[in-house]
Image (cartoon, helix red, strand yellow):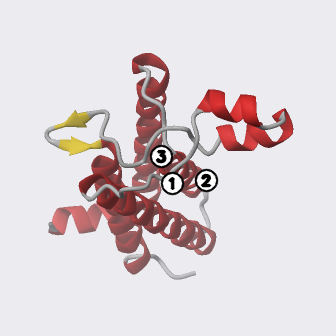
Amino acid sequence: MGALLHFVEAQPRKVLGLVALACVAMLAFGLYLQHGVGLEPCPMCIVQRYAMILVAVLAGIGAFVARPGLRNGLVLGAGAFAVFGAFTAARQSWLQWFPPEVLTCGRDFYGMIESFPLKRAVPMIFRGSGDCSVIDWTFLGLSIANWSFLVFVGFTITAALLWVRRPRG
């Protein structure tokens, strides 16, 4: 544990680069599941993707910023979006474990196109169309939402360590 803390303190830019790379890998896997496997993302999945993108962008910028003060702000922002992503993934996991009797996650894709003008349907498409409480895929007994929660918690802990061990200035 001491070696990990030393690495975080001594190499914050490398740590942020690894976080950004992990985010890109997670996003790529999500796109593979959507387009390669055919799993439809639900609205909560889309929100988690946006949070992942924001964590990736802030961590990626932080990896290249030399000024500690600016990097600290980027770490704080990435940590905040990681907390938001973890909250959304935890809520989705809760819905999967205890599905509601009435589903309110979203409409299906074709129903949106047929029922609404294109101007209103396009934003709905980016909200996702799958059912948030359905478990379509698992790995080691955990759903996508469960894994997303664990990854966001890891990013939150990493951001907290970077913040606590930050250089002042």
Q: Give the class, few, some or many, for how many residues have Cα within 10 Å of label 2's Cα (few <14, many ≥20).
A: some
From the top left corner, tell me how far across and down residue 122 is, in percent.
Answer: 75, 37
Q: Is residue 116 visible?
A: yes
Spot the residue most to the front.
101
Q: How many numbered markers are drawn?
A: 3
Q: Earlier in the sequence, mark 1 or mark 2?
A: 2
Please give the name of the residue rendered at 46% of the width and 55% of the height, measured from the top-left corner. 16
Which is closer to the viewer, label 2 or label 3? 3
Q: Which of marks 2 and 3 is nearer the N terminus?
A: 3
Figure quadrant of the C terminus: bottom right
138 relative to 53, above or below? above
Which SS class for mark 1?
Answer: loop
Q: Disc 3 marks which residue?
A: 45
Q: Is residue 24 left or right of residue 100?
A: right
Q: Disc 1 marks which residue?
A: 104
Q: Are marks 2 and 3 in contact (CB under 8 Å)?
A: no
Tag 3: amino acid: Cys
Q: Is residue 155 visible?
A: no
Q: Which of 53 and 15 is in front in this view?
A: 53
Q: Disc 2 marks which residue?
A: 61
Which SS class for mark 2?
Answer: helix
From the top left corner, tell me how far across and down residue 59 is, in percent.
Answer: 52, 55
Task: Give the distance between the C-alpha atoms of the residues marked 1 and 3, in whole angstroms.
Answer: 14 Å
Figure quadrant of the N terminus: bottom left
Tag 1: amino acid: Thr
From the top left corner, tell me how far across and down residue 114 is, in percent.
Answer: 73, 29
Tag 2: amino acid: Ile
Please give the name of the residue rendered at 25% of the width and 68% of the height, measured from the top-left corner. 5
Task: Give the distance between the C-alpha atoms of the residues marked 1 and 2, in whole angstroms.
Answer: 37 Å
Which is closer to the viewer, label 1 or label 3? 1
Which SS class for mark 3?
Answer: helix
Q: Which of marks 1 and 3 is nearer the N terminus?
A: 3
